[in-house]
Amino acid sequence: MMRYTILLFEDESELRQEIKDSIVFDNVDVYAFESWYQYKEAKIESVPRLAILDINLIDKDGLSVFRDLKERYPEIEGIVITGQANVNNAVTSLKLGVCDFIEKPFRARELRAAIERCESYKQFSVKSYVVDRQLEESRKKFEAHWGIEFVGVSNSIKEINSLMKRVARTENTSVMITGESGSGKELIARGIHSMSDRSGAPFYPVKCTATPDGVFENEFSGYQKGAFSGALANHEGWFERANGGTLFLDEIGDMSLSLQGKLLRVLDERKVSRIGSHEAIPVNARVVCATNKDLKKMIEDGKFRLDLYHRLNSFHIHIPSLRERSEDIPVLVNHFVRLFAETHNKGIISMHSKAMNLLVGHYYQGNIRELKNVIEYAVLMCDSNVIKPKHLKFANERKNGAPMEVEYGLDVLEKKTIIKAMEACSHNKTHTAEKLNITRQALNRKLKKHGIE
């Protein structure tokens, strides 16, 4: 059992002994002193957990002693005892981080109760510290894997990163994220949360897929113990779990109309009532929702509420499919290769140019999620330090009985990009070079290389 060390500073010898006798337990070591000088001469080796200090000592006041102890042992807690209680001493004690402040004369049980309060506070502080560390580690993992921004070099991704930063600075703006399945909608939501002032509070994701309304409502609102058969304990709803942080509603288009009405009411009132209770619980969570459905068409068909749509769509971010931004694929490939090489202890792995051409030319129906799975598989299959076409899942797939044709390679992609830029700049070379962020001389070389007139 770990020893618990208490330092006691009291200049009255009888009271000092009385206090010491009252707080000695099996796992507690109490070291008692009449002065700061006596403590320094004793050279205590163990790290003290608590200091009990009289305000008036022989050579130094108790608050100054605690200040010096706190510098040496930042985790130490303090209880101040005095026969001359005043507001200034109490305020100074609180500023120094003293846990409790009691007046003389006092009984032994009062002091023991103060020690118990300090210990409870200590345990609470430790738990809070652990939770804070876990949150910080999760945030660091997110940023290490993705950076604080969405990975990509295309203009659409640069715009998304800009929008994420802009809306993250707001306090409570609802965000609607649209895009195909696997395009990274939850990642955008987590990025907004991570960049916001709510990052220290929970990010709570919910899938709004087809579920019986009764079960869904239980999770949405929460319930009180005994509210129905099987409600054996109090159960927090979505908004309570995300309180102070971000509630992410994935596939909001799958939510039933009845639950849409309940969601709208909570968003308007910022309060929620558990099933079986009339108490309205204040909630404060930013709502970020995502969908791959056409909500405007659903509104026309009477399947989604127009008022809820406008409430959720305060700020809109659309993620283009990976097929629409092929220039991001090499960047994503390199990112995932590094990520999975580290995850699976594979050392440094590079991508062969032919394999990269295949990856750039592939039709990603599953978007980033599909690319991620392809790269993880390739890293696991690779026994050298270079990923080759044979390591890719789809390398030997056949289309109509013939080997799969690569629709795009890196050179073809570069040529298409230059042609698009030339068209956008009305074939003005200077403007085109600026748009591509290259020199005019480099543009001329590339025009010659690809045979572009």
Image: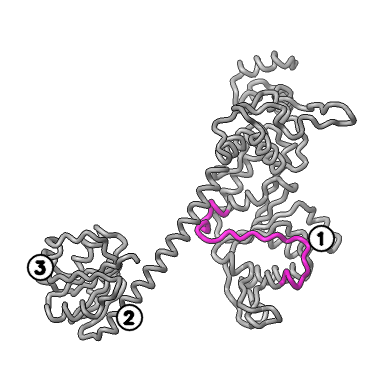
The mark found on residue 406 in the picture is: none
**On the image, which quarter does residue 173 sit in?**
bottom right
Secondary structure type for disc 3: loop
Please rate how many residues cluster around mark 3, counting C-alpha atoms within 10 Å: few if below 14, some from 14 to 19, many from 20: few
- Is 323 in front, or is 378? 378
The answer to whether any part of residue 440 appears in the image is yes
Q: Which residue is mark 3?
A: 59
Looking at the picture, the colour scheme in use is one colour
Residue 413 appears at what percent x and percent y?
Answer: 72, 26
* Label 1 or label 3, whichever comes before in sequence order: 3
Left or right of 169? Residue 395 is right
The mark found on residue 299 in the picture is: 1
203 drawn magenta:
yes
Residue numbers of the magenta segment: 193-217
Quarter of the N terminus within the rendering: bottom left
Secondary structure type for disc 1: helix
Q: Which residue is mark 2?
A: 113
The answer to whether any part of residue 154 appears in the image is no
Quarter of the C terminus within the rendering: top right
421 drawn magenta:
no
Q: CA distance from mark 3 to mark 2?
A: 29 Å
